[in-house]
Image (cartoon, rainbow, N blue to C red):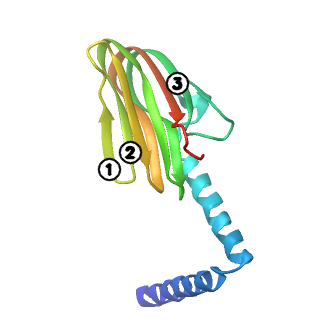
Amino acid sequence: MKKVIAGTLLICVLTVLSGCSAWNNNSDGIKIIEQVENWTEALGKKQITKDSDLCGERTLEQSGDYYSGSYNAQVEQMTGRDVVFGGAGVEERTVICNGNIETKSGSAEIRVRMNEEVVYISPDDNGYFEKVLSFESGGNYIMVDYEDFTGSIDLRCTGADGDEE
């Protein structure tokens, strides 16, 4: 049974791949690529924490653009994660993240996942942080990780000048 399923999946994949190469040089191919991009973006947005489930408040710069905006949270003894900005797509983009973390107790970190790579944005001694992020195609997300955190977070993300969004 496993061989039948694997064979069927292989035939489907080969059919799609051969069909995509035939569409590459015509307008139908462009429509297919745009549709795949739309599906990718829709799936990527499902990873973003819903506004109603956020510990803080997110304001998007443009409706539907989950890469740019602001996030403000004032919490007491919060443990968890807010996936605040990002998504998935085939376009590359540059995002500038900056803000402040005011810690009374516990810890809060800005965590950035760029496909498989994970980086943390560390604040200076005054709680300020800033980082330019170069997102490649794939899944890119900006999160706040809380560990028994009491304090406030102010996070802003904007597209870099000259970056097409």
Vertical side of 136 occupied by 29: above or below: below
* Element marked by disc 2: strand
* Element marked by disc 1: strand
Q: Relative to residue 113, is residue 162 drawn left or right?
A: right
Residue, far front: 162
Whether pointer 3 and pointer 2 mark residues with C-beta atoms closer than 8 Å, the reply is no
Whether pointer 1 and pointer 2 mark residues with C-beta atoms closer than 8 Å, the reply is yes
Vertical side of 57 occupied by 120: above or below: below
Disc 3 from disc 2: Cα separation: 17 Å
Identified by mark 1, the residue type is Glu
Q: Where residue 147 sits: x, y (%)?
A: 32, 25
Q: Nearer the viewer, residue 99 or 81?
A: 99
Disc 1 from disc 2: Cα separation: 6 Å
Give the labeled residue for mark 2. 113
Identified by mark 3, the residue type is Tyr
Give the labeled residue for mark 3. 71
Q: Nearer the viewer, residue 134 or 103?
A: 134
Q: Where residue 119 sits: x, y (%)?
A: 31, 40
* Element marked by disc 3: strand
Vertical side of 41 occupied by 83: above or below: above
Residue, far top: 104
Residue at 44 percent of width and 54 percent of height: 136
Could you classify mark 3 by the number of other residues whose Cα lies within 10 Å: few (under 14), some (14-19), or many (20 or more)? many
Identified by mark 2, the residue type is Arg
- Of mark 3 and mark 2, the one earlier in the sequence is 3
Q: Is residue 77 visible?
A: yes
Report the quarter where the N terminus lies. bottom left
In the rendered structure, find residue 140 and report the number of the disc placed on it: none
Residue, far right: 27
Q: Where residue 107 sits: x, y (%)?
A: 30, 21
Give the labeled residue for mark 1. 117
